[in-house]
Each structure stands twice: as C-alpha cells, then as structure tokens.
Amino acid sequence: MKIVNFMGLRKLAIVFSALLLIAAIASLFTRQLNWGLDFTGGTLVEVVYSDTADLNAVRSTLESNGYAGAVVVSFGTDRDVLIRLPQGHGDDEGNAVVQLLQDNYEGAVELRRTEFVGPQVGDELREQGGLAMLLALGLVMLYIAFRFQFKFAAGAVLALMHDVVITLGFFSISGMEFDLTVLAALLAVIGYSLNDTIVVFDRIRENFRKLRRSDSVEIINISLTETLGRTLVTSFTTLLVLIALALFGGEMINAFAIALIVGIGIGTYSSIFVASNLLVTLGVSKEDLMIPVKEGAEQEDLTP
C-alpha cells in the first residue's frame, strides 16, 4: 500500500483552516446569524388550500398588506402552507391572515393551527442551544480523554469546534435562516465528525504500539492512509442522501440538509487534516500511549 504523506500538507492545511475560521468569526461578529422564528419570537400560521397553493402569490399578498418579512413555505402537500410572521404580531393573527388570503383566492382557505413564540422563549431557546453544544463538546472531551489520552481529547474537541464554527460562519455569510432544525443538524455534525475522528485515532493508537521504529508523523500518515477508504466512502454515501434531501425534500428541511452537507464536508476534511495535525502540534508520542506496567510486574517475571 502506498502511504500518502498527509502531514506533508499540514502547514497548508493550517493556513486553509485559519482563513476559513477568520472569515467565519468575522462574519459572526459583523453580520451575525439570521435567527429564525424559533429564536427571535413571532407567529406561525398553518393553512390549507382547497387546491394547489401559489406560494409567490401568497408572499405578494402578505407583503402588500403589511406583513413584511413573512416567510412562506410549502408544508407537506402542495396545498399546505406554513407562514412565519416576524415578531410584532400577536397570537390572534391567524384568523386575520386567513381572511386576507381568502379574499385574494377563489377557492377555500382553512386555518389549521396558529402558534405564538414570545421573544423571551426565543432567548431561552438560543441560550439552551448554545449550552447544548458546549455540553456536547465537554462530554466528548471527557470520553476521549478516558478512552485515549488528553492530547487526543484536546485534538478532537478543537477539531469539532473548528467544524462547528465554520458551519455557523457559512450560515452567517450566506444569510440563511438559522432555526432549531439547523441547531439539530449542528449537533448531528458533532456526532458524525466525532465518530470519524475516533476511527482515525483508534488506528493511530494501534499503530503507535505496533510500529515502534517509526516516528509520529510517519505513523499518523500510515494510519490516515489505512482509514482513508472508509472515511471517503462513508462521507460520499451520506452526502448523496443529503444532496437528495436538499434538492427534493422541500423548503422545510432544506436548511437542515444544507447544514449537514457543509458540516460533514468540513468534518471529513478535519478528520484527515485537522485532528491529526493537532496531534503532531501537541507532540503526541509513543510514551503517551504506552500501557502502564503494574508495580512489581517485572519482579514477578524474573521469579523462576
């Protein structure tokens, strides 16, 4: 098997990741995220039309009648429409919206449900979502430190933070709406990327104990080459499904699918070039992975 010199590109990978992180962090500070109704508060109205609904006509009707900023998406069938009104509209807005739509439609428009999310609830969801990500990263660090070693834990968590920040930066730069489905996708990205990183780390640990005459960089290159096929095939097949969801799954799950596409793409890159790169930077060595010898074990071996 030909060994690929991944760590020969480690400096280039550092520059590339640094540029992505700088762009993401700068955008998060200047543009911030386009928070969805789940986090900002507002009113959700679900209606059903007697025939196929024209979403563009619904948007035009709402905007011309004082509902600027309303988000209109298809929900379920082509007759079901979900309308998100920004903060400033009350929880009794559903009937007024249905009456307005009915006046501009020849068929029947029926109100299915109305939900109101207050700004305080939105702030709580934002805070709890951030705490959920921090808790996930903390538990990951404890798990890997227990299973491997602290340098591995630090490398894995920093690589996960790299993936999350860049994915958040993508949503900030693109201006796509960030709602609870995207937050769920971010947590899924943490799990996916972690699984990929652990597979690589497991092979690195195994090779450190088996290839005693090789240095750290050589062992990491061998380990990455051995796991490369598994990493690429898993990511490729997952991305095929996500691309299909993004293209044909409808507007309701479009942001969720795109968040996973970006996260898994960056996660695959970080498993190869970031997590292992951090191990080299942190100076991982054979001594870090040596199995401790029990006290008195050498004396017992010498006993006839």
Image: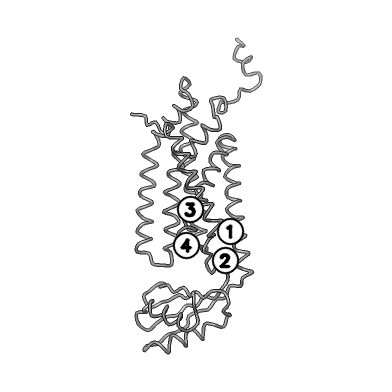
Q: At label 1, which amino acid type do we have?
A: Gly
Q: How far is the residue under mark 2 from the one under mark 4?
A: 15 Å
Residue that mark 3 sits on: 167
Residue at point 51% right, 43% down? 159
Query: Closer to the N terminus: mark 4 or mark 1?
Result: 1
Mark nearest the camera among 4 and 1 is 4
289 left or right of 49 in image = right
Residue at point 54% right, 26% down? 285
Q: How far is the residue under mark 2 from the one under mark 1?
A: 10 Å
Q: Residue 78 lies in what quarter of the image?
A: bottom left
Compared to residue 12, the image places residue 61 above or below, namely below
Compared to residue 265, the image places residue 227 above or below, namely above
Q: Are marks 2 and 1 in contact (CB under 8 Å)?
A: yes
- Relative image position of residue 22 (x, y in whole percent): 51, 48
Residue that mark 2 sits on: 39
Secondary structure beneath dot 4 equals: loop
296 left or right of 68 in image = right
Compared to residue 158, the image places residue 53 above or below, namely below
* Residues packed near mark 4 inside 10 Å, few (<14), some (14 to 19) or many (20 plus): some
Q: At label 3, which amino acid type do we have?
A: Thr
Q: How far is the residue under mark 4 from the one under mark 1?
A: 19 Å
Residue that mark 4 sits on: 175
Q: At label 4, which amino acid type do we have?
A: Gly
Foreground pick, 222 / 36: 36
Q: How far is the residue under mark 4 from the one under mark 3?
A: 12 Å
Mark nearest the camera among 1 and 3 is 3
Compared to residue 219, the image places residue 265 above or below, namely below
- Relative image position of residue 71 (x, y in whole percent): 46, 73
Query: Closer to the N terminus: mark 2 or mark 3?
Result: 2
- Relative image position of residue 275 (x, y in whole percent): 50, 39
Q: At label 2, which amino acid type do we have?
A: Phe
Foreground pick, 23 / 194: 23
